[in-house]
Image (cartoon, rainbow, N blue to C red):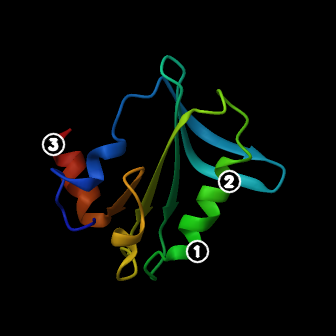
Amino acid sequence: MSGGSLGGHPTRCVDPYSELGRWWYGEHEVDIVGLAPNDDRLLLAECKWTSDPVGRSLVERLWTKADHVRWGPGDRTERFALFSKSGFVDGLADEVDDNWSLYGLSDLEALFATA
């Protein structure tokens, strides 16, 4: 997923969202939330700038937080993205489904270079 290939998996969640920002409710916080009310799409993303690769626990935490975001209908489309300075643990890319995008540092560099 991360490795500079913008033609595949990482670009899935780069759809237009009319509103972007942070979200929190009680003890739950999400770094980036994107709303697309015209077609009931919701993007939830976390950014990690640590020296350790991101693992499965962050995927599970972000997925759980989606249940606490009170926006849109019950059948809304949920997309998820993780941004990581140090990449991801081995096998994580194969464990997430098509609603997830994983961005490593080289993916971000390539994305901004083409913007």
Of the numbered discs 2 and 3, the one sitting upstream in the chain is 2
Marks 2 and 3 sit apart, C-alpha to C-alpha, by 31 Å
The x and y percentages for residue 14 are 33, 40
Side of 75 relative to 85 (left or right): right
Amino acid type shown at disc 1 = Ser
Q: Secondary structure at mark 3?
A: helix
**Can you tell which quarter of the image residue 22 is in?**
top right
Q: Secondary structure at mark 2?
A: helix
Quadrant location of the N terminus in the rendered image = bottom left
Q: Mark 1: few, some, or many residues within 10 Å (few <14, many ≥20)?
A: few
**Can you tell which quarter of the image residue 16 is in?**
top left
Q: Residue furthest top?
A: 38
Amino acid type shown at disc 2 = Lys
Of the numbered discs 2 and 1, the one sitting upstream in the chain is 1
- Location of mark 2 (residue): 65
Tell me, yes or no, whether the two marked residues, 1 and 3, touch with CB atoms within 8 Å: no
Of the numbered discs 1 and 3, the one sitting upstream in the chain is 1
- Location of mark 1 (residue): 57
Q: Mark 2: few, some, or many residues within 10 Å (few <14, many ≥20)?
A: some
> Depth-wise, is mark 1 or mark 3 nearer the camera?
1
The x and y percentages for residue 108 are 28, 56
Identify the residue shown where x is 40% and y is 58%: 97
Amino acid type shown at disc 3 = Thr
